[in-house]
Amino acid sequence: MIPSPLPPDFIPFNRPHLAGPELEYIRQAVAAGKLSGNGLFTQLCQHFFEQHYGIPKVLLTTSGTDALEMAALLLNLEPGDEVIVPSYTFTSTANAFVLRGARIVFADSGPDHPNLDVAQLETLITPRTRAIVPVHYGGQPCDMIALLALARRYNLWVVEDAAQAIEARFQDRPLGTFGHLAAFSFHETKNLSAGEGGMLAVNDPELAARAEIIWEKGTNRAAFARGEAARYEWVDVGSSFLPSELNAAYLWAQVEARDIIQEQRKRHWETYAAALAPLAAAGAFGLLPVSPDDSQPNWHLFALVCKSEPERDALLEFLRQRHILAVFHYLPLHRSPYYASQHDGRLLPHADRFGRTLLRLPLYHDLQPEQQNRVIEAVRTFYETR
Ligand SMILES: Cc1ncc(COP(=O)(O)O)c(C=O)c1O
């Protein structure tokens, strides 16, 4: 047993949840004698998501990052092509396209949510623009109707970064089914997890055959395995994007338990929201994500938007001293040590503000009521004593 370095009363930010059959499914994968990718559990997961969401082709990947990198390869970007990405996001959203030589044009967040501001998007489009990559932060949808209309008008690719958006919907349609492509994450912190893992949703059927080749190191091995090719060989570029069956077996147990997992997250989310709403109404902080009427959230995270960076940092420290791990989130990429010098200098005040003031509270399946009460009481005490 690996010893935990944490004090016994410590409330972590996240704790992986075992739905139940994970270890049994891993045992079955071992017994089946196939541990490399594209075995039974991989196919179970892929077929499930294809049916459940109505996606023409789903490919499991070793991470959400890999799914984004596959998407970038599929778009055949050339050096100097521009890709519009929110600044308030994880590095992988931009990095996947930088690896292909693209120039990133950063979009600001909306005034009241961290997603890219669709109202400002058209001003960022130039003759070099090839793609828009909306991120559904915390499962809160971007306005995909307005975004797709713009993309169609300018003939642009849309790659949804749905890393945090599994099971969330916009106008009764699952997030990750709007763009030509979408990347999901099954990282340990996500609602459904494989430890590390991801999937690429190929919503444009014309990209499906090549996606499978890129997935399998640039070979037609998947077609060969189905008996559709006499031998498999190198037919395109690609890499090793498919996960081991061990990860897929673990993930399948989580996929089966998705309704229970989502219900529990919803309960935790609503408990926080009900307890902290009076403070929010009194103006102490904002609450995220907000769910527009035409969307269905996925309860991925619960965040406070504090009034200032010193106040946010003081609250983080106040909670840490009480053995509660709350965390900030992204540092806007237009200010990152790697890309700041390549940013065009536009001010992105809303992305900056979320970078300085957002704080996420612990939210995970096995969070106990007394632990959640401790978090709530600590937040209340912090604001009552200020
Ligand atoms: C918005 C966003 N995109 C991409 C990723 C990358 O996913 P992964 O960690 O599975 O590579 C993350 C990870 O948390 C994310 O939050």
Image: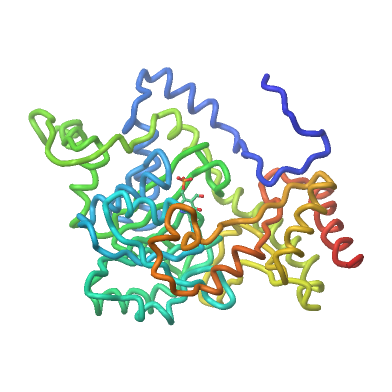
Quadrant of residue 356 within the rendered picture: bottom right
Q: Report the side of 235 relative to 166 (left or right).
A: left
Q: In the depicted view, which residue is nearer to us: 313 or 215? A: 313
Quadrant of residue 203 within the rendered picture: bottom left
Would residue 166 be visible to someone looking at this image? no
Return the x and y of residue 24 as percentages of the image width and height.
Answer: 53, 25
> Furthest-left residue in view?
230
Residue 194 sits above or below residue 76 on the image: above
Return the x and y of residue 242 as percentages of the image width and height.
Answer: 33, 36
Return the x and y of residue 328 as percentages of the image width and height.
Answer: 65, 56
Quadrant of residue 75 within the rendered picture: bottom left
Q: In the depicted view, which residue is nearer to us: 40 or 313? A: 313
Would residue 123 be visible to someone looking at this image? yes
Q: Report the side of 368 relative to 58 (left or right).
A: right
> Furthest-right residue in view?
385
> Furthest-front residue in view?
341
Please count the marks in the image: 0
Name which residue lies at 60% across and 48% down. Answer: 261
Quadrant in which the C terminus appears: bottom right
Name which residue lies at 27% across and 37% down. Answer: 239
